[in-house]
Image (cartoon, coloured by chain):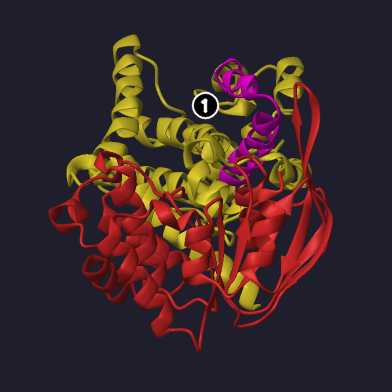
Amino acid sequence: MIELHQLTKAYPTRQGLNVVLDAVDFVFPARTNVGVLGQNGAGKSTLLRLIAGAEQPDSGEVVRKGQISWPIGFGGGFNGSLTGEENCRLVARLYGVDVDDVVGFTMDFAELGAYFHEPVKNYSSGMKARLAFGLSMAIEFDIYLVDEVTAVGDFRFQEKCRRAFAARRDRSSVIIVSHSLSTIRSYCEHCAVLKNGQLLYFDSIDDAQRVYEAA
Amino acid sequence: MKGLLIQLQVVYAILLREVKTRFGDHQWGYAWALIEPSLWVLTFVGIYHVMGRMAPPGMSMIAFLATGIVIFQLFRNTSAQAMAAITANRGLLFYPQVRPLDLVMARAVLEGATQVVVFAMLMGAAALIEGSLRVDSVLTTLLGMLLAGGLGLGFGLVLCGLNTLSPTVERLHGPLVRPLFWLSAVFYPIDSVPTALRNILLYNPIVHAIELVRDGWFPGYQTRHIDPWYPAGWILVLLFFGLSLERVARRRLQLS
């Protein structure tokens, strides 16, 4: 479970402060897959980084229960000069889990072939996302934070991700941020909309869609 | 306690990765990190030999210059590495359990350990050439090295914090540290300096660290003017400011 209390974050811009989260109170219920819809620039990625703890809020707090992943997406956090395998070793050590298990699992899951042993800077963004996805699946998290999952690989790989999440339904849940309704429909039962610094919760995705599309 | 263990695990992970990115897969990568500073010392030994200058009585030239140059490098390189820690490894802050301080610690420890190995190698070489090895007090020697490394860490941490506020700070390191090379009793025992000048030089905490190492290493080398508490005080003040800056920096660091 994740609770946001009066969470506030703003970025200075040339036009003044851009408030992406304005005193947000919110509860992500345990074992529920929640999608967060938002336009580009609404602050979806910022929200995920705040939840993960990779970034500090201006005020307010995030209460976390359980092991939470880093924001999984295009592979921010990978070192370009290290190979895929070396990056896996690094992250496994950061999380204190068995290095060889993680490397073996990720190699299988990400299907990068020989590129697994190439420096990450030579990867396409799809390949980076595959690596990030496989790696996060190799470590047991209670909550996976996923940034724009639609970008990850082709249809077949997306199916694989869906099955992997489905297989661990009873242990873990997902929070996905996206601007795409179809992504959120295929992963989540419940939905929130991030708009004008507020996070609104909806039990049904259809209700969320109405608010989201009403510009 | 659990938090401390996680932090140690994180620092260790970053340290291993630093070894990989800095020294590469090449087996000579790390060897070069040891050879380069040793050559630097040997160059000075050569120059001194040609100039006909002698080490203080009872000391080999290599050993005397190593206590000066390597211990100074321990300070200088540790501070330079610590200062650039965040710029170089910003991507790692993506992982929530990695804090800026961990990046700084990992680099400082790696660089400090490297210089300690260089020191041991040169002192070992000097002992082989002399045919004898007598260390007055290992503990005092280690204390001096710890103080030099601690000064480097503290100074680097402060610059690292300032650097996140204004990236121009990084350029100040060279101009600030280079003159210190001549003002830190690297080439001369501090007691050989005229009183008036010595009293000024003693404000420099690195002098105390270097002289402490000599005092500990060479039997019969005595310094009357140094005080280990003085650099220790500097370290406390630098760490206090550095850690406060880290707290500010943590909020300001924006991830791309």
Quarter of the image where one finds residue A105: bottom left
Report the residue at 30% width, 47% height from top: A82
Image coordinates of residue A189 in percent, x first then y, are 58, 75
**Residue A5, image x and y in percent?**
83, 65
Q: Chain of mark 1?
A: B
Which lettered chain is shown in red? Answer: A
Give the residue at x 72% y 16%: B197
**Residue A3: quadrant of the picture:** bottom right
Examine the rendered structure and indicate whether residue A122 appears above or below residue B76: below
Q: Residues within 10 Å of mark 1 (few under 14, many from 20)?
A: many
Locate residue B50: give its quadrant. Answer: top left
Of residue B22 and residue A15, the one placed in the foreground of this image is A15
* Residue matched to label 1: B186
Q: Main secondary structure of the magenta part?
A: helix
Whole-percent x, y for residue A101 in the image: 29, 77
Screen quadrant of the N terminus of chain A = bottom right
- Quadrant where the image shows the C terminus of chain A: top right
- Which of the pair A92/B46 is nearer the observer? A92
